[in-house]
Amino acid sequence: MTHLFVHYHLRPGGVTRVLQCEAEEFSRRGIPFFTITAGPASSLTGEHREIPWLDYASKAPFSVKDLWATVQDLPRPLIWHIHNPMLGCHPEMSALVEQLALAQERLILHIHDFAEDGRPENLQRLSQGPPWFPTGARVHYVVLNRRDRDVLFRAGLSESQVTILGNPVSPHPLPLSVHEHPRLLYPTRAITRKNIGEMLLLAAIGPAGTTFATTLGPGQSRYQEEYGHWQQIANDLALPFEWAIAEKHPAPSLEECVAEATHLITTSTKEGFGMAFLESIAWQRPLIGRAIPHIQENLADAGIVHPFLYEGIFVDGIDFAKQTTAEKTRLLEHSRSHPEFIQVLLRNRLIDARQWLLEALSPTHQPLPISLLDPFHPKRHGESISLIAQNLQEAPESAISYLDAESIRRSFSA
């Protein structure tokens, strides 16, 4: 049996970190594996094979023959462990998954995000291709939480064909930051769903000396215009903000960026899992910012409750996150001179945002204990993936059918 980790790329990001952790755990356990992506091997362990047309929206010709040629020398059976196969970022990925399923290959379809969850362009791309979400005895889904599992159940997936598996996180406590004043870091790529305007709103009311920073820009993507807009607004309002500190030259590592921070911050409105909610514990940095209900419910099952996550933020009674970029800009400019109009919704109670932020940044507050990460340890994650692979190795051939894609779309539009 050969385990194949397949992803579009190995650029910095949450899915790449998960794939790297899985590869390292397989290496530790002595399980044969390969990684297959569009780009070079980065820092992953194990042998890597490169297929350029796998990258997002690649224009290179799609060829299943090229794929088979890449893996024909590997011991069978093959376990195709594909990360985010139904995201819709690649025009041919759903065709690749379908052909592998029809060929009775063994598939682990590891869903981190759904195209149906606020990605209309990706969903449109999927709808123009073959059916997605195949099912069969040799197809197993991995999802991050109960919400996503229930979405697939409603679409027709059986309980035996899906596993809930949180992302693996290794404890890696960092020394205390040397900065005297609070320094808040958002370890993210600055795209729309990360809600960067809301972070600027918090920067506008931070205590004197507080600074805010992001690790990455949006990359070469459609988010560049919005990113440039927020950079200009931050400059115009003289906000204490640094952009894309991990892209400086020479580029610091993510851990080096975190080591400089006193706190982590998240303002994201949509996440499949939300690595920051666990990585803040792993790095031993308090986390503040916006809660995501379905994620907080799952983490609470493991005893993880971040005390300084709000359910919403309002400017003069207006829900900031639900506004257009233009309206967010107006509210942000208004708030710079009238910070008393900003409130956060914390445990169903509206309170002054400045009061909340001052309390959240108090040096008396400690990070959550590392022991809370035990359920997410890479060893447990690796054991779960190995068990799925072993079951697939023994699974018989079967007919291939498809989940109800319209049901999945309705689940996220409700």
Image: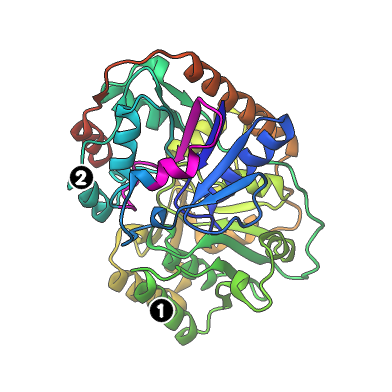
Instruction: Mark 1 or mark 2: name the one nearer the start of the chain.
Output: 2
Residue 329 relative to residue 373: left or right: left
Three-letter code for the amino acid on which mark 1 is drawn? Gly
Q: How is the image coloured?
A: rainbow
Residue 154's place in the image compared with 346, above or below, is: above
Residue kind at label 2, given as amino acid type: Gly
Secondary-structure class at tag 1? helix
The magenta-colored residue range is: 66-90
Please tell me which residue is depicted at 71% across the width and 61% down the height of the picture: 262
**Mark-to-mark CA distance, 1 and 2:** 33 Å
| 35 to the left or right of 86 | right
At horizontal 29% and vertical 63% (from top left) the residue drawn is: 323
Q: Is residue 59 magenta?
A: no
Image quadrant assignment for residue 109: top left
Position of the N terminus by quadrant: top right
Q: Is residue 144 visible?
A: no
Which residue corresponds to mark 2?
129
